[in-house]
Amino acid sequence: MGVALALLAAAFYGLAGVAIQRGRATACGDNGVFLSVLATLGLSAGAWAVAGTARLSALDAAALWAFGLAGVASVILGRVTMFRATEALGPVTAGLLRRLTPIFAIPVAVVLLAEWPSPAALAGGGLILAGVALHLGAPGPLRGAGLLLGVASAGFYALAYGLRALGLGAVQDAALGTAVGALVGLVWFPLAAWRADRLGSLLVDRGPWHVTAALALAAGQLTHFAALAHAPVATVAMLGALDVLVAAIILRLISGAAPARPGRLIAATALAAIGTALILA
């Protein structure tokens, strides 16, 4: 069950990356960022209502702050930079850059959780860097701003994971924590749009690709959490890296365009997957 859920999560994330890139062509607003926040809130709140183990009353101030700050890091900063990196670089390269998240998670764990990395974790970080470098060394156009956004997204998500771990130490309910984080986005994006006099643009992007990206991101997050309940973290992490290959396959089916040097992409993904498993084992 855990392996199946992890593979399903990778498929959802791969599909989301392709949908984000495809949705850019018809986007008139944020390309569905806020729509994805609504989908995450709806699915996570629904999962908590059906199978949640904690009540709202169990959220003390510390857990509430941790989940809320995790929402700032992931739902606001991480998601916006992930969308923009995917638009600039495509779902394959942007997806591989997200494999840098466990590397950033190492210093985050030291600062927030007082967890020092093991030699295996450091070796895993080296493998991830080698995989990313191998892919970026392949021929093809690269945009500096897109690379920076992709790296920043990985850093923001790593910070979110550390903050969420702090909250889960007090309240063991991932769905509730995710819903609280999404609530932060539900408040932030309308306020930011209102201040920029762009409130009407929040939900203007509701095309098929925008809806697909929103639902796939939300479903990927929930199935990823569910997989962690049935399989070791290292196994889920390793299989999660397959979202890069899923995105490449979907692109090939849709457009007929094969990735440059597919063998190199597979090798880069394998290095990133093994490295991630070592860090999280």
Image (tube, rainbow, N blue to C red):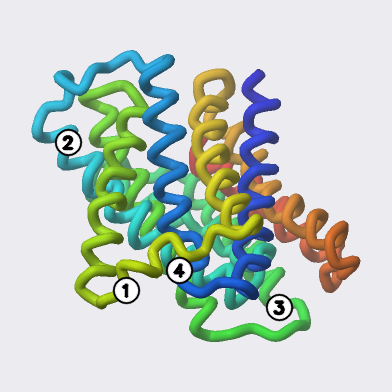
User: Does 107 appear above or below 257?
Assistant: above
CA neighbours of label 1 inside 10 A, class few (<14), some (14 to 19), many (20+): few
The structure residue drawn at horizontal position 56% and vertical position 26%, both measured from the top left corner, is 227
Q: Position of residue 242 (x, y in %)?
A: 70, 47
The structure residue drawn at horizontal position 22% and vertical position 44%, both measured from the top left corner, is 68
CA neighbours of label 4 inside 10 A, class few (<14), some (14 to 19), many (20+): some
Name the residue beneath numbered marker 1: 198
Tag 4–tag 3 contact (CB < 8 Å): no
Name the residue beneath numbered marker 2: 64
Q: Earlier in the sequence, mark 3 or mark 1?
A: 3
Q: CA distance from mark 4 to mark 3?
A: 31 Å
Instruction: Tell us which disc is closer to us: 2 or 3.
Output: 2
Q: CA distance from mark 1 to mark 4?
A: 10 Å
Q: Earlier in the sequence, mark 1 or mark 4?
A: 4
Instruction: Tell us which disc is closer to us: 2 or 4.
Output: 4
Mark 2 lies on a secondary structure that is: helix
Name the residue beneath numbered marker 3: 137
